[in-house]
Amino acid sequence: MFNLDKMKQAGSLMKQMNSLKKKIDKLETASESKDGNIVVIIQGTSNIKTININEEYLEEISSKDLEKTLTKTLNEALKNAEKSSQQIMSEMTGGLNIPGL
């Protein structure tokens, strides 16, 4: 038989999940290289919003070292974004692991 209460609960849960997704999508996480010459900002969990590189640093570093530092900083930024996202999900879901989020 049709259960109206269950439908209301499901609708409420969907609204909460959409709210959670929007909050995570707006999340911005920054990561900085150890020397402070590269700053990466991630929006959400996987969108690179900006990469800032100190111009003086570009003049004194080899392309190979720049690539290594940039890769390391990007990976750290992505890891931090994922960690922040998980923290928001945990706060909003009370620690409940919801697949797909």
Image (tube, rainbow, N blue to C red):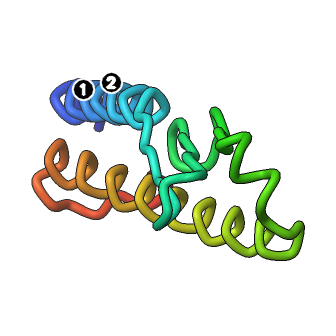
4 left or right of 68 in image: left
- Counting the numbered discs, the total is 2
The residue that mark 1 highlights is: 12
Q: Residue 54's spot in the image, x, y percent?
A: 65, 43
Is 2 or 82 nearer to us in this picture? Answer: 82
Residue 89, placed above or below residue 20? below
Is 52 or 100 nearer to us in this picture? Answer: 52
Q: Residue 11's spot in the image, x, y percent?
A: 31, 26
Residue at image location 18% in from the left, 48% down from the top: 93
Which secondary structure, mark 1? helix
Is 87 or 77 nearer to us in this picture? Answer: 77
Quarter where residue 16 is shown: top left
Quarter where residue 22 is shown: top left
Residue 7, placed above or below residue 76? above
The residue that mark 2 highlights is: 15
Residue 49, placed above or below residue 54? above
Is 19 or 43 nearer to us in this picture? Answer: 43
Q: Amino acid at mark 2?
A: Lys
Residue at image location 77% in from the left, 60% down from the top: 60
Q: Are marks 2 and 1 in contact (CB under 8 Å)?
A: yes
Residue at image location 85% in from the left, 69% down from the top: 62
Classify mark 2: residues with Cα within 10 Å, few (<14), some (14-19) or many (20+).
Answer: few
Q: Amino acid at mark 1?
A: Ser
Which secondary structure, mark 2? helix
